[in-house]
Image: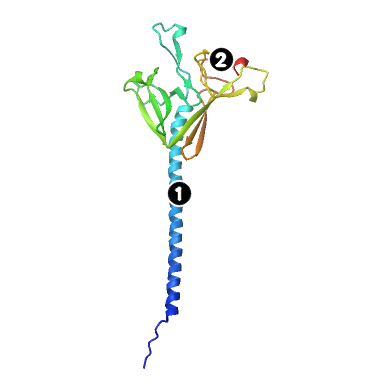
Amino acid sequence: MSHRRHFTFLELAIAVAIMLMVTLALFAYSQGVARSWTKIIGEKNRFQELLEMDRAIDAVLANVVPFTWNTGEDITDEDSKFPFIVADSHTLRVAYLHDLHDPVEGALRFAEFVVQDENLYLTYSDRPFYQWSDLGGRTQTVLLAEQIRQVTFCYLDWSAVEDDDWEDRLLWLDEWETEDSGREDVPLAIQMTVEWTNGRTESWYRRTMGNSYRERYGKWTPLDEDNR
């Protein structure tokens, strides 16, 4: 004669407790995996964004060249020459060399970094201008990054004071003056710092085209002691 053994209340309670512990452990593990995966995806997206920004910023800063155009009818009139560069702590408008895709467009672009509505844009044209409105439809805009608080720039110059050591002759400026100084050159190097709304910052430092320890691209006058 067989006897059936029934589980006691204590045994059922222990089994349920073990099941709950295993379930909670699995839930906590899955939550940790989900958080880690979300973090990985966020880092991947951030890295991809930085790569795309780096390509665009490098294409501009590393290829900046002096460009002076004559705004008058007489192309020999020195007073009508206009250097195409606007460079202060929050604005950078420059000419830069670009791969030749279309002979009509040429190999020069005229571009400006613009922060608008917390977005960072690169706006450019294949023609020089005074104001963007002068170009009509000859402009293109590329979105570089979103949720941007501000962008700041610094410009590297070279002092004319020969008595200083080599390192002391390198000057970082918040503004590159051309209008009153008569300069037609571009900075030796440009540093661009981007600050996101979440407090994250990244900086890009690029030497401009043709500029090195022993040579400069285009007409150049070093900064004298009175303007340091």
Q: Nearer the viewer, residue 215 or 17?
A: 17
**Whether residue 19 is situated above or below residue 187 in the rendered picture:** below
Which x, y percent locates residue 224? 60, 15
Q: Residue at x 60, y 24 (%)?
A: 170
Whether residue 178 sits left or right of residue 16 in the image: it is: right
Residue, disc 2: 221
Q: Quadrant of residue 124?
A: top left
Q: Quadrant of residue 144?
A: top left
Q: Nearer the viewer, residue 15 or 105?
A: 15
| Figure quadrant of the C terminus | top right
Which x, y percent locates residue 117? 39, 33
Residue, disc 1: 40
- Visible residue check, residue 131: yes
| Figure quadrant of the N terminus | bottom left
Which x, y percent locates residue 29? 45, 60
Say which amino acid is labelled 2.
Thr
Q: Nearer the viewer, residue 189 or 13?
A: 13
- Visible residue check, residue 62: no
Say which amino acid is labelled 1.
Ile
**Whether residue 28 is situated above or below residue 148 in the rendered picture:** below
Query: Callout 2: few (<14), some (14-19), or many (20+) C-alpha neighbours within 10 Å?
Result: few
What colouring does the structure picture have? rainbow
